[in-house]
Image (cartoon, rainbow, N blue to C red):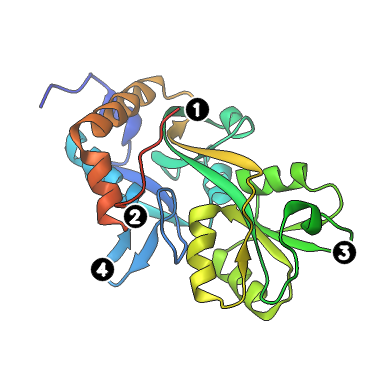
Amino acid sequence: MPALPDGLKDEIAPTGKLRVAIAISPAGGAFWSTKTEAGYAGVPVDLGKAMAAQLGVSVEYVMHQNSGQITDAAGKATWDVTWLPRDPERETKMLFGPIYEVADATYIVKPGSNVTNFAGLDQPGVRVAAVNATTTMRGAIAHLKNATVTGYQTYDEIFGLLSSGEIDAFALSRDQLNKMAQKIPGTRVLDETFKKTVTAVAVPLGQSQALAFVTKFMAEATTNGTLRKAYDNNGLKDSPIRTE
């Protein structure tokens, strides 16, 4: 292993551990992680473990309910590295490295709904949920001119509201919604896409040395199979790694 640059560990792991910020959902995926009996599982979990090993430090996972909470904590020195959806608002709060996932954002409609497309969804009185303060929520608010978009803190809360019909639809990435549809009979994932969500590695502002390291790490992880293995280990064997 090549020698690490002087001062890198002090910048990227000031507590002596690499603190990896993760967000939890039951469905997992390329961004979301899941809670397990042994701790946590997910693509960011595997990447964080590999990155810590390269740095020669232990890893610590800092759990959040969603990517908005991770963003809000970016200036509070509670995490060192994360993998999350990138957008212009977040670029003012953290430094981003390479993109490793491009996901289609769409909507799932409640059981029994007669809505089959975006035009039918975007009507006055229609209640659309999104995970609070996320890239997808901002995209849904921009997309829907007549329906009402409300943010909730957790995937689980929205799952319950959709199951009971208390909301009409939920905005999220298509892979997450397809898994949700399997668990709630009668729901439908709409075919159209309203936003491409890109996911990337990120570090807090001002950490240029850390950014250079995580950028190099992700480039190598893409070519040496580390990223592919993380996908395969987390139920994403059929999902391509999509960079832009």
Q: CA distance from mark 3 to mark 2?
A: 37 Å
How far across and down, in percent of the image, does residue 26 sit?
A: 45, 67
In this view, the mark in front (3 or 4): 3
Tell which tag, 3 or 2, sits nearer the viewer.
3
Residue identified by numbered label 4? 38
Q: Please identify the quarter of the rendering in which residue 11 is found.
A: top left
Decide: marks 4, 1 in contact (CB < 8 A)?
no
Question: In the image shown, does 70 or 158 lie closer to the viewer?
Answer: 158
Q: Of the residues shown, which amino acid type is indicated by label 3?
A: Gly
Residue located beneath label 2 in the image: 42
- In the rendered structure, which amino acid carries the disc numbered 1? Leu
Residue 189 image point, x, y percent: 60, 61
Q: Residue 125, which numbered label? A: 3
Label placed on residue 205: 1
| Sequence-earlier tag: 3 or 2 | 2
Real-space Cα separation, disc 3 to disc 4, in angstroms = 44 Å
The answer for how far apart the CA atoms under marks 1 and 2 are is 25 Å
Neighbour tally class for label 2: few under 14, some 14-19, many 20 plus, Cα within 10 Å: many
Q: Nearer the viewer, mark 1 or mark 2?
A: 2
The quarter of the displayed image where residue 162 is located: bottom right
